[in-house]
Image (cartoon, rainbow, N blue to C red):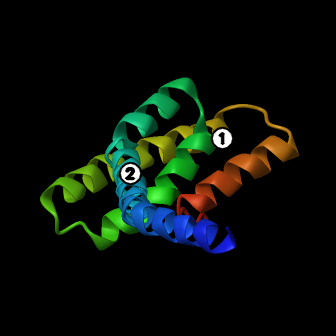
Amino acid sequence: HLEMVDSLFAKIDTSTSKSSERIDQLLSSRTVLSKLRYVFNLPKVLSHCLAKGMFREAVGAYNNCVGFLRTNKGLLTLGSVLQQSEALAGDIQKALEKKLTGEFLDRGKAAEIAGLLLDLGVDRA
């Protein structure tokens, strides 16, 4: 009986290995598509975050994508996303600088805003 069980398991392994490989391929494709969707939505995300004053989220999203976009800016659509995103990052920078100079801030809030500006690549030295 043990040989029969081993034989059945071998048949199951053989029949499921192709399906397993295909599932792995589909999951990998899904991951890539999800990441591309995230990159292509960056201008919309930045615009939304700017409008809502969600600067930490905006800077994080920008920094997550900008390296990839700069590396691949030769591709027309990614170059366009980069241009839009950099323009919005400039708007975010201006809004943060206005907050930093325009209202009374405690040290913690001022340090947070300064950190976000540094994360955007702004050196105010």
**Residue 111: x percent and y percent?**
78, 51
Disc 2 or disc 1, which is closer to the eye? Answer: 2
- Secondary structure, mark 1, is helix
The C terminus, quarter of image: bottom right
- Secondary structure, mark 2, is helix
Q: Which residue in the structure is indicated by mark 1?
A: 101
Q: Quadrant of residue 76?
A: bottom left
Foreground: 92 or 56?
A: 56
The N terminus, quarter of image: bottom right
Q: Is residue 125 visible?
A: no
Q: Residue at x 75, y 48 (%)?
A: 112
Which residue appears farthest toward the right when viewing the image?
Answer: 107
Q: Is residue 13 visible?
A: yes
**Residue 43: x percent and y percent?**
35, 41
Q: Which residue in the structure is indicated by mark 2?
A: 30
Q: Residue at x 80, y 36 (%)?
A: 105
Q: For this view, does 63 lie left or right of residue 30?
A: right
* In the depicted structure, whether residue 109 falls above or below residue 120: above
- Numbered disc total: 2
Q: Quadrant of residue 100?
A: top right
**Residue 40: x percent and y percent?**
31, 46
Q: For this view, does 69 lie left or right of residue 95?
A: left
